[in-house]
Amino acid sequence: MSQPYKAAVMPWPSQSRGPSHATHGRLAEYAASTFDATCARLRYHAPRGPLTITLACMDIIPVIDLKGGLVVHAKRGERDNYRPLATPLANSAVPRAVVDGILSYRGFTQLYIADLDAIAGGAPHGEIIHAIATRHADVRVWLDAGLRAPAQLANLPMLPNIDYVLGSESMSRLEDFHALCAVVPAARRVLSLDNGPQGERLGCARLFDDELLWPARVIHMTLARVGSGGGPDFEGLAALRKRAPHCAVYAAGRVRDETDIHALAADGVAGALVATALHEGRITIASA
């Protein structure tokens, strides 16, 4: 009989310098982080044949949503209605099969995992996440497990290839954010500014209003657009980039196809989180 999963308690890597609120300091933290900016080559099928366009440092990050032990299909943030994922990249919705299929499809070097049970306040998929991260040790994992307090980290795998997403929807107070920042190093932090199904801001308002609080990587999450046909929120992304040019801004929510990817790259967006379009074959990407 297998032993129950217990998260390894490991010390965070020592930091060579203290936190800095200056733009220069944040850029230095970003450059020194373990995060890899991966160039993506996009294939467009024009009437006269395929057109290949290379976009420098545009990160394409596949997403899996975990719920009840399976990968589910996220749509418009209506989490109670999510169903097991059906994809040509795997023969089941079992996480190992889906992740293996995604990562072998185009050689992605990053993966975003949203643990929906943990985000909702339930038990995290600790064993499954640990298995994915150790099986694919060369892949950088962005983990969103609904972190609200440092104590939750004891139930999550603490591996060198896992970065931790601090989602605004999980934090009602600024103190929650500061407490997590005190234990999660800057190089391992990602902030997700979460907007709800009706476009409303989710969580602590100060996180949206004060860009000096933002780490080097910021996700503009629009749940209303996830799995829908609305396209990325180009206006909202541009506003974030203008406010915080020192941050790498990522799009999350209905990136429909390669045309959207190309437009996001042209606007200076650092990367995009993709799911539905990838499984439906509307994004064809080869790692450069």
Image (cartoon, rainbow, N blue to C red):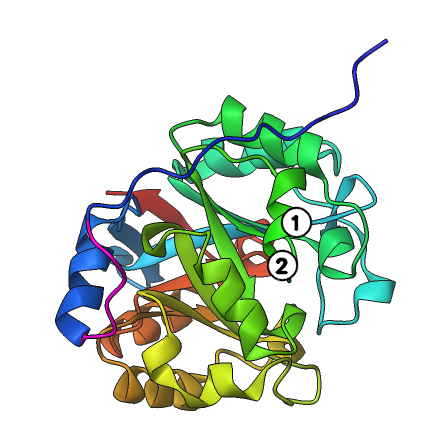
**What amino acid is at disc 1?**
Gln
Give the answer, above or below, for where 268 lies relative to 147: below
What crowding class fits label 2: few (fewer than 14 Cα within 10 Å), some (14-19), or many (20 or more)? some
Q: Is residue 256 visible?
A: no
Q: Are marks 2 and 1 in contact (CB under 8 Å)?
A: yes
| Residue 147 relative to residue 37: left or right | right
Report the residue at 48% width, 35% height from top. 103
Give the answer, above or below, for where 69 lies relative to 121: above
Give the answer, above or below, for where 53 lies relative to 24: above
The residue range painted magenta reads 17-22
Query: Within the magenta stretch, is there residue 21?
Result: yes
- What's the CA distance linking mark 2 and mark 1? 6 Å
What is the x, y in percent for residue 106?
A: 41, 39
Secondary structure that dominates the magenta span:
loop
Choose between 275 and 111: the one closer to the eye.
111
* Residue ID for mark 2: 149
* Residue ID for mark 1: 152
